[in-house]
Image: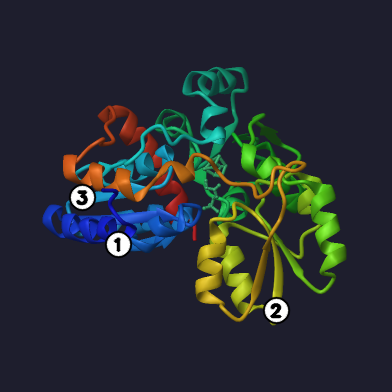
Amino acid sequence: MATSRQQLMDRIAELKKEKGAVILAHYYTNPEVQAVADFLGDSLALAVKAQSIAEPVILFAGVHFMAETAKVLCPDKKVLIPCPEASCSLAESCRAEELARFKAEHPGHLVVSYVNTTVGVKAHTDICCTSSNALQVVESIPAEQPIIFAPDRNLGSYIKRLTGRENMLLWDGACHVHEEFSLEGLRKLKLQYPEARVVVHPECRAAVVAEADFVGSTAAILDYCARSDARRFIVVTEPGILTEMQKRMPEKEFIPAPGAEAAGCNNCNYMKMVTLENIVSCLENEGPEIEMEESVREAAERSILNMIAIK
Ligand code: 13P
Ligand code: SF4
C-alpha cells in the first residue's frame, strides 16, 4: 500500500528528532517539501542560517550547490542531500578549471561569483554574491578594480547597468528556467491585468527585466509584495515561490508568468527532484552526504565569508 503524504511527513518529524537533524529548504521546492522545512529561505538566507544551527545534521532540501555551501560553512556537521543529482544549469555552465584558465588569461581581475556555483569555482573566487546582495558586493569593490563576474550573464549585465561599471567581464552562463520566460507571454498578461505589479528575478533576460516594477531575489520579491498596496502581482521567477506568497499574503493574487511558448509554468526541474520520499530515505540512511577536500573547502569558505561580511 502506498504511503500517504501525512505518513511521510510524520516519519520525517520522527527521524528529525532521532537524528538531530534540521531541514533547510529553498522557496522553489515542492509545497510538501516546504511544509516539512524548519527554515525556508533564499540562497543568501539559507547560507547565513546554516552557520547558526546547533543540531549535528543539516538536510538541505534544494539543489547540490546549496548543500555544498552549507557544508563549506559548517564542516563539522553532517550535511545531507536527498537528491545529489539535483544540479543547476548555472553551476553547470562554469567549471572550476575553465574559470582558473579564464582568470589566468585576465590577470589583475577580481573574481565575483554568484553562489550558484560548485565549491571548486568558489575556491577560485574572491567574493561570492547572491541575487540579494550582488549590487552591494560589486559596489564594495573600488571602481577602478576590474572584475570577472561569473557565471550568470543576466545578473552580471543587470549589475553592470545599475552601476554603470564598464570594467566587468561577464561569464557566458545562464539559468535555463529564468532565461525562458516569454516576453510576449508576459506582455499579454500585462495587457490582461494592467493594474498588476510585475516582479522579476534578475536571472531573467534584460528585455524581461525591463518590464518589471520590481527586480530582486526571491526574498526581496516576497518583501516587496508584502509591503506593496497592490492586490495583484505577475511573478516572473520559479513558481515554487507562489506557495510562500499565498501563505503570507492570502488576500493578494499572484499570477505566474509563462515560460517558452506553450510550455506553461516555468518549473526548475532540479528543485522539484526533492521529494518527501527521498527526504525520508536520506534521513534513514544518513546519506547521501556532502563531502569535499579540506583545501578546496577552506578556499571556498573565504569567498563566502567575504560575501557575508558585506552588509
Ligand atoms: P535566490 O534564492 O538568491 O533568489 O536565487 C534564486 C535561484 O535561482 C536559486 O537557485
Ligand atoms: Fe539553478 Fe535556475 Fe534552478 Fe535556480 S532556478 S536552481 S538558477 S536552474
272 versus 247 height, above or below: above
Of the two numbered discs 2 and 3 on the same chain, state the one appearing first in sequence. 3
Q: In the shown orientation, is residue 291 left or right of residue 90? A: left
Q: Position of residue 108 (x, y in %)?
A: 59, 28
How far apart marks 1 and 2 lie (CA) works out to 33 Å
Residue carrying label 3: 57
Q: Nearer the viewer, residue 293 or 217?
A: 217
Q: Please, what secondary structure does the residue beneath circle 3 have?
A: strand
Of the two numbered discs 1 and 2 on the same chain, state the one appearing first in sequence. 1
Q: Position of residue 218 (x, y in %)?
A: 56, 58
Query: Is residue 305 something that shows in the picture?
Result: yes
Single out the mark in the foreground, 2 or 3: 2
Single out the mark in the foreground, 1 or 2: 1
Q: In the shown orientation, is residue 215 left or right of residue 27? A: right
Residue found at x 32% / y 54%:
50
Q: Please, what secondary structure does the residue beneath circle 1 have?
A: helix
Which amino acid lies under the numbered mark 1 shown in the image of this protein?
Answer: Gln
Q: Position of residue 14 (x, y in %)?
A: 17, 59
Which amino acid lies under the numbered mark 3 shown in the image of this protein?
Answer: Val
Residue carrying label 1: 6
Residue found at x 59% / y 34%:
151
Single out the mark in the foreground, 3 or 1: 1
**Residue lying farthest to the front in this orientation:** 1
Residue carrying label 2: 231
Residue found at x 29% / y 30%:
292
305 versus 188 height, above or below: above
Count of numbered badges drawn on the protein: 3
Q: Quadrant of residue 9?
A: bottom left
